[in-house]
Image (cartoon, grey):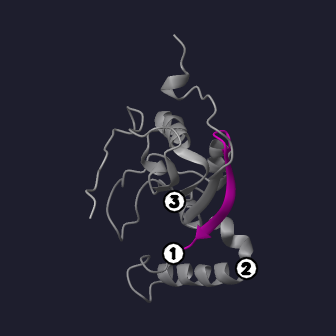
């Protein structure tokens, strides 16, 4: 068995320790919402730099426009807080994104969206008991979501697959593009 090699880097402060066009597939799952907003462009540019043309980026993140978040806002609560049933206080989400925002940001870096799926997974952990009105409401929503596709945009989590269609382009957010 070959020895495994693990690379680490502070993705907020330094370029990824991989050469250009190194990967055919990159997963970026449940990370975007934890990044400081001023570093998102840098991280996306690094992902674009390290994916081969024709390569795939698979990303997922909580949906800013989900039904759950809309209900939280109506109740005067922050969408960055986790539900009380899971934990108290801030979970470390800095900013949530809508799929269209991510599609736009990745398109600027040479990616095309191949597929976007919304997931609703509320009923399993919402409410204080199986018979609570909150859990019943979310189960009804999930049932309707399966039958009526117009509710897709209200899903909890988006999952997106992108294909890199363009060669690396110069990006002002990437350190190698800065001129002295």
Total marks drawn?
3
Look at the image and give the residue range highlighted in magenta: 107-120
Number of residues whose C-alpha sits closer than 10 Å to that of mark 3, classed few (under 14), some (14–19) or many (20 or more):
many
Q: Which residue is mark 3?
A: 62
Q: Nearer the viewer, residue 55 or 65?
A: 55
Q: Earlier in the sequence, mark 3 or mark 2?
A: 3
Give the CA distance from mark 2 to mark 1.
16 Å
Quadrant of res 48: top right
* Disc number for residue 121: 1
State which quarter of the image contains the N terminus.
Answer: bottom left
Q: Nearer the viewer, residue 141 or 4?
A: 4
Give the CA distance from mark 3 to mark 1.
11 Å
Q: Which residue is mark 2?
A: 148
Residue placed at 65% from the left, 78% from the top?
A: 145
Residue placed at 28% from the left, 59% from the top?
A: 2
Q: Earlier in the sequence, mark 2 or mark 1?
A: 1
């Amino acid at each position: 068995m070959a020895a495994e090699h693990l690379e680490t880097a502070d993705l907020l402060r330094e370029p990824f320790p991989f050469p250009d066009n190194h990967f055919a597939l990159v997963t970026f799952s449940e990370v975007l919402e934890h990044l400081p907003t001023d570093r998102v462009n840098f991280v996306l540019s690094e992902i674009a730099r390290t994916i081969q043309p024709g390569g795939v980026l698979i990303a997922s993140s909580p949906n800013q426009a989900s039904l759950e978040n809309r209900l939280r806002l109506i109740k005067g609560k922050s969408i960055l807080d986790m539900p009380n049933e899971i934990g108290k206080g801030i979970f470390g989400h800095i900013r949530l994104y809508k799929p269209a925002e991510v599609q736009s940001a990745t398109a600027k870096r040479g990616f095309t969206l191949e597929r976007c799926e919304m997931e609703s997974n509320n009923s399993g952990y919402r409410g204080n008991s199986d018979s609570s009105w909150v859990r019943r409401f979310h189960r009804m929503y999930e049932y309707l979501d399966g039958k009526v596709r117009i509710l897709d945009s209200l899903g909890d989590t988006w999952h997106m697959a992108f294909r890199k269609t363009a060669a690396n382009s110069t990006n002002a957010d990437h350190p190698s593009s800065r001129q002295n």
